Structures are given as C-alpha cells and as structure tokens.
C-alpha cells in the first residue's frame, strides 16, 4: 500500500506529479473523490493512505480531490449518509447554521464599524460614510468572498482599510480597463499608485467642506456603482 502524499495534477487525469517531480499513476482500485464534502474527505483519509491533489495558482492553492481506494470511499460515504439521515444530525446542522449566521452578522457589524473608523469622514459627509461602509461590507464580508476582509492574517482595522481601497480602485479609477505589463511587480506598483489617489480622495471627505457630488468620483460611485464583472 503506498504512502499518503500531496500531489499536483497533470494534463492527464489519470496521472499526478509527486513532490519530487515524479509522475505517478494511482494504484489499481483507487478512484478520485472530488472536493466539496469535507466530512467525507476526512473519513476517507482516516481510513488509510490517500493522495491529495492540490493545484497552486499564484499564491493560492486549490483542492482537486483525493485519490483513495474505491472501497474506502464507498464505505465512508455509506456511513456518512446513514449518520446524516438521523434526527440528531439534522438538529446539530440547524444549530451549527444558526451559530454561523449569528457569527457572520456580528462580524459584518464589527467590519462596518471598522470601515467607518478608517473613513473618519467629516460631519458634512456622514451620509456618504455610512453608505460606503454598507457597500464595502456587503461586497467584502460575506463568507467565501475571497476578499481581504475574510483573512485573519491581518487585524480587522487593516482589513477594513484594504477593503475600502480595493473598492475605490475598482469604482473610482480605470484600473479594470488598464493594460498592465506582465512584468513582476508591475501590477503591485499600479495598485500602490492608485491607492495614493484613493487616499487623497478620502482626505477630501475628511474636511468639513461640502463639494458638488457630480464632480466627485467617490460621491458619483456611491450614487451609481459599477457592477462587478
């Protein structure tokens, strides 16, 4: 029986690449369990050796499934289906869902307040600050959004700041239409420059001096935001 491995996919769906670069073919009787059911995957891995297929794209990694003996997958699936059919499991699921929804609601409130603290708009722009906090939170805070607002690697205040700057980059600049050279660091530099523009725009709203909304990129974006692609 082979050892458990973390492998990379190849263009051939029946072959994978080992950490040392060796091309491997799963043993006879093994099949690929697709990603998506964490409970089933855990049970299959606990049953014996598996090959976990992970694909790296930039800084992100994506699960492409787990190769394991088909008998282990079949047995684990049957056990799990039987467990999930019980009333106790249904009650636990409902309780877990209610807890997640409560935690998410609390996080959205905390995140929106962090956005407001970062904005620190003058009283004349209180309405814009509240609207911006709502918009940024609704786009950034949902579970699975994949945005900086969901990362726990940086403090909440920095997440709020980064989310606001990202929203402004897409809504008040031509970033989405720019042709950026495929050179290492080029996109980062463009984002840095646009972030400075966005910060200057925020500073305008931190001064208690009213201005025409029609001439303000931020005010205009709040009134008529671009739809994400």
Image (cartoon, rainbow, N blue to C red):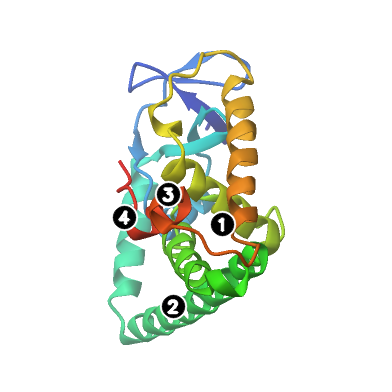
Circles 4, 3 touching at the beta carbon (< 8 Å): no
Q: How much space separates mark 1 and mark 4, taking CA atoms? A: 23 Å
Q: How much space separates mark 1 and mark 3, taking CA atoms? A: 29 Å
Q: Nearer the viewer, residue 185 or 135?
A: 135
Disc 2: which residue: 101
- The disc, 4 or 2, on the residue closer to the chain's N-terminal end is 2
Instruction: Please tell me whether mark 4 sits on a helix, a strand or a loop.
Output: loop
Q: How much space separates mark 1 and mark 2, taking CA atoms? A: 17 Å
Instruction: Please tell me whether mark 1 sits on a helix, a strand or a loop.
Output: helix
Q: Which of 100 and 147 is in front in this view?
A: 147
Quadrant where the C terminus lies?
A: top left
Q: Which of 194 and 229 is in front in this view?
A: 194
Disc 3: which residue: 215
Question: Which of labels 4 and 2 is toward the front?
Answer: 4
Q: How much space separates mark 4 and mark 2, taking CA atoms? A: 30 Å
Disc 1: which residue: 149
Question: Which of labels 1 and 2 is toward the front?
Answer: 1
Disc 4: which residue: 224
In the image, taking residue 223 as reference, residue 166 lies left or right, namely: right
Give the vertical position of 77 relative to 190 (above or below): below
Give the residue at x 36% y 27%: 28
Question: Which of labels 2 and 3 is toward the front?
Answer: 3
Instruction: Please tell me whether mark 2 sits on a helix, a strand or a loop.
Output: helix
The 10 Å Cα crowd at callout 3, few under 14, some 14 to 19, many 20 or more, is few
Residue 7 in percent (x, y) is at 52, 28
């Amino acid at each position: 029986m082979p050892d458990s491995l973390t492998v990379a996919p190849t263009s051939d769906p029946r072959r994978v690449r080992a950490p040392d670069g060796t091309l491997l073919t799963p043993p006879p009787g093994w099949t690929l369990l697709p990603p998506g059911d964490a409970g089933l995957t855990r049970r299959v891995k606990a049953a014996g050796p598996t090959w976990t297929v992970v694909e790296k794209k930039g800084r992100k990694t994506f699960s492409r499934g787990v190769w394991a003996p088909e008998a282990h997958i079949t047995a684990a699936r049957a056990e799990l289906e039987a467990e999930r059919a019980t009333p106790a499991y249904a009650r636990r699921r409902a309780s877990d869902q209610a807890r997640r929804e409560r935690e998410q609601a609390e996080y959205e409130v905390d995140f929106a307040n962090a956005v407001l603290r970062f904005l620190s708009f003058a009283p004349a722009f209180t309405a814009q600050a509240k609207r911006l906090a709502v918009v940024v939170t609704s786009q950034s805070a949902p579970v699975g959004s994949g945005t900086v607002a969901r990362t726990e690697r940086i403090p909440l205040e920095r997440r709020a700041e980064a989310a606001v700057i990202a929203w402004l980059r897409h809504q008040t600049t031509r970033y989405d239409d720019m042709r950026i050279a495929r050179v290492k660091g080029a996109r980062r530099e463009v984002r840095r420059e646009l972030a400075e523009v966005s910060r200057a725009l925020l500073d305008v709203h931190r001064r208690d001096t009213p201005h025409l909304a029609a001439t303000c990129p931020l005010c205009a974006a709040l009134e008529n935001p671009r739809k994400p692609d």
